[in-house]
Amino acid sequence: MNGSTALLDHAQRRAMALRDQYREAGHWSGQPADVVRTAAMRRPERLALIARGEELTYAELDERIDGVCSSLAAAGVKTSTPVLVVVGNDVDSVIAVHAALRLDAVILLVPRSVGATQVADIIGRTGAEFGVAPNWPATVEPELAGSATWIALDDCGTPDTEYRSERAADEPCLVLYTSGTTSKPKGVIHSQSTLLKASSNYTAAAGLTDDDRIFLISPLASVTGVLQGLFIGPMLAAPVILEDRWDPSATCELLVTSGATWYGGPDRLLDRILDEAVARKATIPLRAVYLGGTMLDRRIVERIEDDFGIIVMRAYGSSEVPVSTSGLRGEPRGVRHADDGVALADVEVRVGSSGDATECCIRGPHTFLGYTDVDDDAAAFDGDWFRTGDVAELDDGRIRIVGRLKDIIIRNGLKIPAAEVEEAVTKVPGVVECAAYSVADGTTGERLALAVVLESPRQVSLADITDSLVSAGLPKYKLPEELVIWDEPLPVNANGKVERNKLDARSAGRPRVLADRLVSH
């Protein structure tokens, strides 16, 4: 990278240390990569993007990207220039990211949903001088207006030249921001090589082909969105369907009319789409789906396969180590549903780190190259191994994620994984949704509380749940001692994950049942 920015210096050093090994193995490349240009040359007539009221072929997408390159270059964006790109799931956002990549800029990729305050914070922390925010009017707000040069892309016109990337694919170039809910998001640095490797593993495990149509409901700025929307689609020369405005009815309509065959995202959102399809007697075109996360609702998974004939695969990964393990499309259903699959090609998994004997650690050519804040790296790695922060079990090459280390409730010194309890509770008849979380306790240090959404408020008691968990084999110290009844869906972030840190505060005033020892004090 010419004129490497201080923002990426330590990631560049990490890339250099791994480069010979991964280039020799064929996982990384010293040549430039441009997945859209390649797709446009191979299959120019193929649909690339589908959105409400707009479709683009790969040839048209390639030309539009060059048009935006002209605008960025005219504004002063050069090789290695950090550019903040604020995106939604729309055509203009996809084009903006690819244009910044083609110009060899450093992309700081942020979803619109984070809001102006967090965008301003990222600008302050990174020193980014340029920003691009298609279809996001917040750039005129006082805290953003003078923070960077915001480049308008309203009328790019016909490009005056054909732009070509000259940056090696394994140079650090793209920063994603974690969706952490308890602290400031970390900047996760990738190269195109790390993302291309993750994408090829994803495609192989999922059994995707150029006949598929990828329904993108995860935010484009998330690692799932980047893989599906920016890399896998062009790598297959397959269309990506962009859903920018979640609404059960409208989203179902878009999925059906677009002929989407593949969905990768939260199980609860898909469940609501299927509810809508049933109500309108619509045929769902999906053939297979990836569902991720440590807490999947077993009943939703079984419904997807039983009622709709859609193959369900579980996948595990993060912004730092995208799609590291997965069930495989050709495996029997019982195998696919039982755990988080096997390590994908060239990915290594072990259980145990310098900090915790149960922590899942991962390494491989898909692994990120470090955080933008070098201080965050110190606790993130054991040598080449990334410490995921997840508790895992590894049995005969198959991985099962038990939960987050920080989602462990410690009661009288004994550890209770929240996800393990949740998985058992979802099997209790009458429980629609649940989440386990920690509450401070003067006697035990912490106690396990359970937020539940029920089919009927009077249908399930705390005793029903604890009896069911004991019957399922859970020891008594893992039983919840506080049951809070919610009459609305539990709070989730943009990736569909329940925000546990908000449950205790937002439980105030809700109906609750306490264990006997708490009632007597």
Image (tube, grey):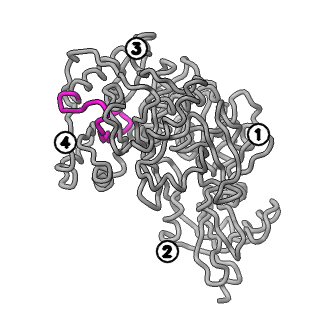
Residue mark closest to the camera, 2 vs 4: 4
First reached walking from the N terminus: tag 1 or tag 3: 3
Which mark identifies residue 397?
A: 1
The reply to whether callout 2 and callout 4 are in contact (CB within 8 Å) is: no
The N terminus: image quadrant:
top left
Q: CA distance from mark 1 to mark 3?
A: 39 Å
**Mark 3 belongs to which amino acid?**
Ala
Tell me the residue at 60%/54% (across/down). Answer: 389
Q: Is residue 340 left or right of residue 148?
A: right
Q: CA distance from mark 2 to mark 3?
A: 55 Å
Mark 4 burial class by Cα count in 10 Å: few <14, some 14-19, many 20+: some
Query: Magenta includes 192?
Result: no
For disc 4, the marked residue is 149
Tell me the residue at 64%/36% (across/down). Answer: 347
Write the start and end of the magenta stretch as one range: 73-93
Q: Is residue 76 left or right of residue 348?
A: left
**Mark 1 belongs to which amino acid?**
Gly
Q: Is residue 315 above or below residue 420?
A: above
**Mark 2 belongs to which amino acid?**
Ala
Q: CA distance from mark 2 to mark 4?
A: 44 Å
**Location of residue 430 in the rendering, given as x and y in whole percent from the top left corner:** 67, 58
